[in-house]
Image (cartoon, rainbow, N blue to C red):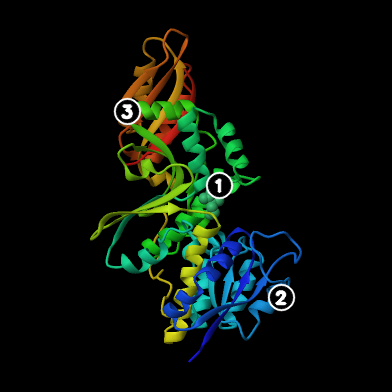
Amino acid sequence: MKKQINIGILGLGTIGSGTYSVLNSHKSDYVKRVGAKIAIKKIAVKSLNKKRLVKVPKSLLTTDVLSIVNNPEIDVVVELMGGINPAKDLILKALKNKKHVVTANKELLANYGKQIFDTAAKNDVDIYFEASVGGGIPIIRPLKRELAANRIIKVMGIVNGTTNYILTKMADEGSFFEQALSEAQAKGYAEANPKADVDGYDAAAKIAILASIAFNSRVVANQVFTEGIRAIKPQDIEYARDMNHVIKLIALAKENKEGLDVRVHPTMIPVSHPLAAVSDVYNAIFVEGDAVGEVMFFGQGAGGKPTASAVVGDIIDIAGNIIDGRTGKMKCTCYNKKQVMPVGQIISSYYLRMKVADKPGVLAKIARVFGDKQVSIGSVIQKGHGGKLADLVFITHQTKEKNLRAALMLINSLDEVSKTNNVIRVEG
Ligand code: HSE
């Protein structure tokens, strides 16, 4: 029987450093849990002399990534570099060399998942990726295992901490997006280039992974309708509050007769919804299953140690599999081929804020267009009185998005309508 499981780590940034420190913190417990020692053999870094978040013996560091993925002594490769290149080639090489892989790489899995999981299956090795969604929050394994008895009805989450922090600041302080973003950058939550977070791409990759597992059908990142939070104004947040709602960047996936509805966009949810209370950088994922009902997973979705908690959990699981001789058993579960619905086909309620001329007959004109396009109005409030222009805020009943878009095209061309300032989908 093996006495030691050797691991090689690719990357020693925030998550790599967290993983190094967590792996070294409870070593003796891990030996008891696994039945063998887990030893770090090598860590690949870009530069040997960089200042690091953790103290690591120089002898462990290398700049030669191939000396890890081709090393016959290494049993598990832990990829924590992020991005597609060179992570993809390195993971594929490691799998072909019969090494098990742990990765936190959502972008890679959401774009090249099939190739990666097929290669793992062909080589009878494990690939675990709990840290790819929700940082330290357990969600991949619960969806694959503990909730396996269910038909999943809906997965809906706040899976991006940066945008949740920005929207929380905007709501608490009445600030504009740009101010809240600068604050998030100053606190180190948002990257210097915040595009992946604020434009929704990070959340889209994460919901693609969750949808693939929840509905047993591969969803790739570019199939996810994605809208970020740049267009949200303090006014929208205020009007939402007047209606007992909050605005969150929600990633959601549900199944309809026409296929899978998978999307990321700012969403108005009632204050009574469990996700409404998730603030600052916290993440939460709400799952509805036909047997379990509603469950919610909550915690820190980013950061070195929380994410390392998921990475090391995967390493311990694989190490245990190696010792017990049951590797290669957690197969890819995408055995269905379901269509992802085009956004025009989705059904939702909508919040609409438009600037219109404040004079008799305008509301009637707008209402007629909505009626003609089968869009039913749930409520309308006029905000702002006394000037030439007023804000009209509509909430529609559930309608097909293509009907709403057709109505808005016509409404925006009316002389009395200055502009539709914002359209926000409403859930729950
Ligand atoms: N940038 C992400 C966030 C964390 O803000 O939540 C990494 O997925």
Q: Nearer the viewer, mark 2 or mark 1?
A: 2
Residue 306 image offset from top left, x and y in percent = 49, 58
Amino acid on which disc 3 is placed: Gly
Disc 2 or 1, which lies upstream in sequence? 2
Q: Nearer the viewer, mark 3 or mark 1?
A: 1
Disc 2 or 3, which lies upstream in sequence? 2
Residue 25 or 427: which is nearer the viewer?
A: 25
Q: Which mark is residue 402?
A: none
User: How far apart are labels 2 and 3 at the CA level?
Assistant: 72 Å
Amino acid on which disc 1 is placed: Asp
Q: Quadrant of the C terminus?
A: top left
Residue 364 visible somewhere in the drawing: yes
**Disc 1 designates what residue?**
197
User: How far apart are labels 3 and 1 at the CA level?
Assistant: 37 Å
* Point 63% across, 72% down: residue: 90
Amino acid on which disc 2 is placed: Ser
Does the CB distance between marks 3 and 1 fall below 8 Å?
no
Q: Is residue 68 left or right of residue 351?
A: right
Displayed quadrant of residue 48 = bottom right
* Point 40% across, 21% down: residue: 392
**Disc 3 designates what residue?**
371
Disc 2, SS: helix
Q: Is mark 1 within 8 Å of ligand 1?
A: yes
Residue 397 image offset from top left, x and y in percent = 30, 34
**Disc 2 designates what residue?**
59
Residue 14 or 84: which is nearer the viewer?
A: 14
As drawn, which residue projects farthest toward the left?
Answer: 291
